[in-house]
Image: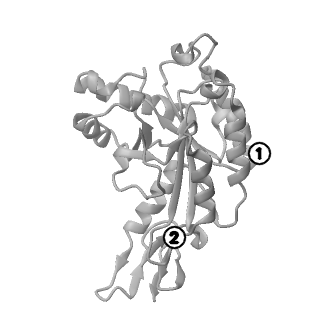
Amino acid sequence: MRIRFPNGKKKVITFSYDDGVEQDIRLINLFKEYGIKGTFNLNSGLFNTIHSVFGNKECKRLSHEKLKQIYKHPNIEIGIHTVSHCSLPSVSNSNKILEVINDRNNLEQIFEMPLKGMAYPYGHYNDDTIKVLQDCGIVYSRTVQSHHSFILPTDWLKLGATCHHNDDMLMPLAHKFLDENPTDKEDPFMFYIWGHSYEFDRNNNWEVIEQLLKYTSYKEDVWYATNIEIYNYIDAYKNLIYSSNDRIIHNPSAISVWICSGDKTIELPSGSTVNI
């Protein structure tokens, strides 16, 4: 038996963008236009400041007052990114904890919901960092590694992506994602794209993301999800309870889960016990 995504779909696409800059406004509007979902990772100690990595053009972080207006939408998940965008391995463990838990708490108070996901500033992490995230209740954290594949995560606290949006393989991978399908004996595909929205202004290439969104949007066989929605769904799948012969399955979670058994796709409704 293999996991399948909601309604039996075999593919999911998701996006992850960092730093909470004003260019997020344009990107989120594109997400809304094309029905795309994504995760935005914010630094709660840097609102309304100038982002120093933008080169000779201005890159301003969004103000505290604009946050709900911009990010409060069903297509958007908020993730944490530490208070000050520090390289976590370079600071003491006590400061690691403060950077993570204070960012989480600050953003949870603004958006009035639990936040469990994160992206590592600069992609930097080590074993001590991962232990701190676990202690702070973070269930996944994105790195900056690209694996150019559609594999499902095996270690959510070392979450890699398919590619960055400036990767030369972006559109070839998009074509492969839509053109190919996993077999009944394979896990579903996950196409994961990451970046910073200010890069589109810096590189003058907004057409890159618009082309990708237009090409991948509104496909009947694709699930459009935020990072945490994918994590929660796979977690629900992992928590299915099986009989000794694997033919009776109980789903104790609050969401329906779909599985592939042979050539059949089966829904396991929330709280149900199904004999397959």
Task: Tell me: 33 left or right of 255.
Answer: right
Whether residue 138 is visible, yes or no, is: yes
Q: Where in the figure is residue 10, as x and y percent of width and height?
A: 56, 68
Q: Where in the figure is residue 67, as x and y percent of width and height?
A: 62, 28
At label 1, the amino acid type is: Glu
209 lies above or below 263: above
Give the quadrant of residue 50. Answer: top right
Quickly name the residue at label 2: 182
Look at the numbered discs 1 and 2 and tell me whether their residues touch, using CB distance below 8 Å: no
User: How far, Cα to Cα, is label 1 from label 2?
Assistant: 28 Å
270 lies above or below 43: below
Q: Where in the figure is residue 140, as x and y percent of width and height?
A: 40, 46
Q: Where in the figure is residue 82, as x and y percent of width and height?
A: 41, 27
Give the quadrant of residue 169. Answer: top right
Q: Nearer the viewer, mark 1 or mark 2?
A: 2
At label 2, the amino acid type is: Pro
62 or 26: nearer the viewer: 26
200 or 46: nearer the viewer: 200
Quickly name the residue at label 1: 33
Numbered disc 1: secondary structure: helix
Whether residue 77 is visible, yes or no, is: no
Q: Residue at x 59, y 15 (%)?
A: 48
Q: Residue at x 68, y 54 (%)?
A: 216
84 or 193: nearer the viewer: 193
67 lies above or below 156: above
Assess disc 1: are there few (<14), some (14-19) or many (≥20) residues with their C-alpha within 10 Å of its C-alpha: few
Assess disc 2: are there few (<14), some (14-19) or many (≥20) residues with their C-alpha within 10 Å of its C-alpha: few
